[in-house]
Amino acid sequence: MTNALRVSPRELARLISGLERGDAEAQQRIFALYRQPPRAHMIGVTGAPGCGKSTLIAALTRVWRRQGSTVAILSVDPSSPFTGGAILGDRIRMGELSQDPGVFIRSMASRGAQGGVAQAAADAAIALDAAGFERIVIETVGAGQSDISIVHLADTVVVVEAPGLGDDIQAIKAGMLEIADVLVVNKADRPEAEAAFSTLAAALELGEAVTGHHGPAGVAGRISMPPAHHRSADGWRVPLLKVSALRAEGVEAVAQAIALHQRWQAAHPERAQERAAQALREHLQSMLLRAALDRIGEQQFNAWALRCAARELHPAEAAAQLLASVVKEGDCA
Ligand SMILES: Nc1nc2c(ncn2[C@@H]2O[C@H](COP(=O)(O)OP(=O)(O)O)[C@@H](O)[C@H]2O)c(=O)[nH]1
Ligand SMILES: [Mg+2]
């Protein structure tokens, strides 16, 4: 039986390619699919390049496959081993997963996608949900605004840290701590991991002391959690977990923490509302910019940019004047 709200494996690849190109037909298909309730759990995994995100995702996928869940992995990390032909080349890491029909692996390119790779990946996740994948993992490099926005689109955000990347608390510096639902210190098989773990644990305790957030115990409070954690602004206790993704040690605890968070957030719909508001804001922002640039025209835009470069005008003054002229001309309809 064919169902217009189901995406076949054959349609899936075509649809995602269409989204990458910013293809209008693919976009319309996603609009239709979005109207059905989501079933998949969307998990964002982020962290500095080389911290072991891809290795951890592969290890988590093995756990989920043993539990009977299907898994889709979207990578927006250009250095990822999931990227392009490297998937097949990296047999040790992905091993049997690349042959498993219950696992879908795809890297996302940003070329041409309107609103950038974050929105294209969010739309691809909708397609993957409609294709029946139960866990959808989005891997992003923990740097830059698009990565922050992509994690706003996930139900559960896993932030990965690792020793030996030059800075023990990069996650905190990049503002990643605020967005973490689960914090992982990877490469625990290396002795330096202990220091990274302690630094992060201390920073978390400090954060808790500063916010002074001590609400009633949530879902996590009733289930034994690792000793180091802190309470996020909305009451979720963020677990800090030590893992060796390479040796598949501690990975089941990460899967458990992710499952706990999935249950917790199902009881907190305000999270999903905030995510939708954020997505709406981002779409408005990119559409407004596009509409303004269309009206201004490239030639005029370049002329104003030259005036800014010549120090005739501050860019903010120029933007305000351009905006005023655009709004006066147009009727915003
Ligand atoms: N020692 C050790 N190395 C790891 C571990 N996890 C990943 N690595 C290595 O770290 C490097 C980067 O891993 P990768 O998963 O590609 O990191 P990503 O850039 O964050 O996706 C690779 O050489 C991995 O083999 C771990 O738990 N322990
Ligand atoms: Mg990677």
Image (cartoon, helix red, strand yellow):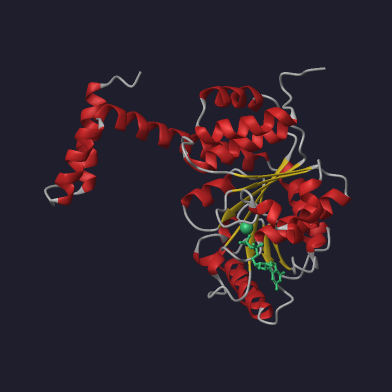
Count of marks overlaid on the render: 0
Q: Give percent across and percent down for residue 79.
A: 57, 57
Q: Can residue 101 be seen in this view?
A: yes
Query: Residue, x 78% and y 56% (percent of image)?
Result: 95
Q: Can residue 231 be seen in this view?
A: no
Query: Residue, x 87% and y 45% (percent of image)?
Result: 68
Query: Residue, x 27% and y 27% (percent of image)?
Result: 295
The answer to which of 89 and 255 lies nearer the viewer is 89
Q: Give percent across and percent down for residue 233.
A: 60, 55
Q: Which picture quadrant has residue 213?
A: bottom right
Above or below for 29 versus 47: above
- Ligand 1: image quarter: bottom right
Q: Which picture quadrant has residue 6?
A: top right
Q: Give percent across and percent down for residue 92.
A: 76, 61
The answer to which of 169 and 140 lies nearer the viewer is 140
For the C terminus, the quadrant is top left
Q: Which picture quadrant has residue 251?
A: bottom right
For this view, does 10 lie left or right of residue 325?
right
For the N terminus, the quadrant is top right
For this view, does 312 lie left or right of residue 132?
left
Above or below for 325 versus 189: above
Q: Give percent across and percent down for residue 161.
A: 62, 67
For this view, does 120 lie left or right of residue 92?
left
Above or below for 123 versus 3: below
